[in-house]
Every structure is written in C-alpha cells, then in structure tokens.
C-alpha cells in the first residue's frame, strides 16, 4: 500500500514539475522574441521632448503644463537648439486657419517623399491635439511631427 501511495505522489510531482518547466520555457521564449525598433524608440523620445520639455515647446508658467505649447517657442532656431538629433524632423502646427512648418536637419527632413522606401528610410508621423498659448490667449491647435531617419 505504501508503494502505491508513493508512486501516486511521484507521478503527481513529475506532472507539476513538467508544467512548471514548460511555463518557464514559454515565458523566456516570449521575452526573447520581443524586438525593439530603435527608430521607433528614437522617434518616441524626440516627440516627447518636443511637446513635454519646457526648453522645447511646452508652456511653463509657474509649472510646465502638459498639452499646452508656447507659440513664442515655435521657431526654427529655438527648436534646433532644443533638439540634438541626426534625424530629420518636420513640425507642422495648425491653428485657426494658419499653418506653420519647421524643418529640423533639412538634409533628411526634405526626404519625406521617399518614405515609401521602407528598407532605406524610417518615417514616423504622429498627430497631437494641443492648446496653443499665445501671450494670454489660448487656441486649440494640431501639431503633426514627422521624424525621418536612415535605417
């Protein structure tokens, strides 16, 4: 009788250990299949720096307001000083019926027409609905950020 109980316990242990090993292998396998696209990560960092950093476009009164950009900071010289990147960046700000466009790193930024070539260029576009602060006035605005890089 003791031998039968012991064999049942061992068979139960073997099944549990096998399930744990399979579960661990599945977790490790899913982590190794994850691919990080460097161009997407760089574009994400650039876009967030543009709209969230008070040294770039973010409006700061007594604190930095998320989703509010300063109209006075939207110029090429200020943005070139803010961004230190080798990627081409196109910023298109639309408010009321006005549209302004700024190109950073013109050598790559003007290559946006070649974005269909996915083997050579990495092009990522993101639109943001923001509030544009101009002196004491606030306007709804749309900021489109295109990042263009070489693969």
Image (cartoon, rainbow, N blue to C red):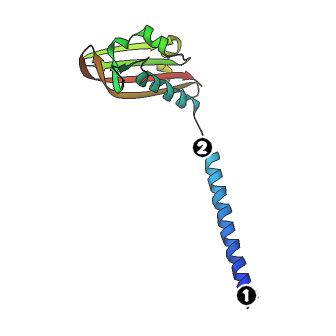
Q: Are marks 1 and 2 in contact (CB under 8 Å)?
A: no
Residue pointed to by mark 2: 34
Kindly identify the residue that appears in the image at 23 percent across and 17 percent down: 137
Can you say which quadrant of the picture contains the N terminus?
Answer: bottom right
Q: In the shown orientation, is residue 93 left or right of residue 32?
A: left
Can you say which quadrant of the picture contains the C terminus?
Answer: top right
**Which of these two is toward me, 118 or 125?**
125
Q: Is residue 22 above or below residue 126?
A: below
The residue furthest top is 77
Tag 1's secondary structure?
helix
Give how far apart the Cα atoms at labels 1 and 2 are.
46 Å
Q: In the shown orientation, is residue 128 left or right of residue 111?
A: left
Q: Is residue 134 above or below residue 116?
A: above
Q: In the shown orientation, is residue 93 left or right of residue 146?
A: left
Q: Is residue 96 visible?
A: no
The residue furthest front is 62
**Dot 2 crowding, Cα within 10 Å, few <14, some 14–19, many 20+:** few
Residue pointed to by mark 1: 4
Badge number at residue 67: none
């Amino acid at each position: 009788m003791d031998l039968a109980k012991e064999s049942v316990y061992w068979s139960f242990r073997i099944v549990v250990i096998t399930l744990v090993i399979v579960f661990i292998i599945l977790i490790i396998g899913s982590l190794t299949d994850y691919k990080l696209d460097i161009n997407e990560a760089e574009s994400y960092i650039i876009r967030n720096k543009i709209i969230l950093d008070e040294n770039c476009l973010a409006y700061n009164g007594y604190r930095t307001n998320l989703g509010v950009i300063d109209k006075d900071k939207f110029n090429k010289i200020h943005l070139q000083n803010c961004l230190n990147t080798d990627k081409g960046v196109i910023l298109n700000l639309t408010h009321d019926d006005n549209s302004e466009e700024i190109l950073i790193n013109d050598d790559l930024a003007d290559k946006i027409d070649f974005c269909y070539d996915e083997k050579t260029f990495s092009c990522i576009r993101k639109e943001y609905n923001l509030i544009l602060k101009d002196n004491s006035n606030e306007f709804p605005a749309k900021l489109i950020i295109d990042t263009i890089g070489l693969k």
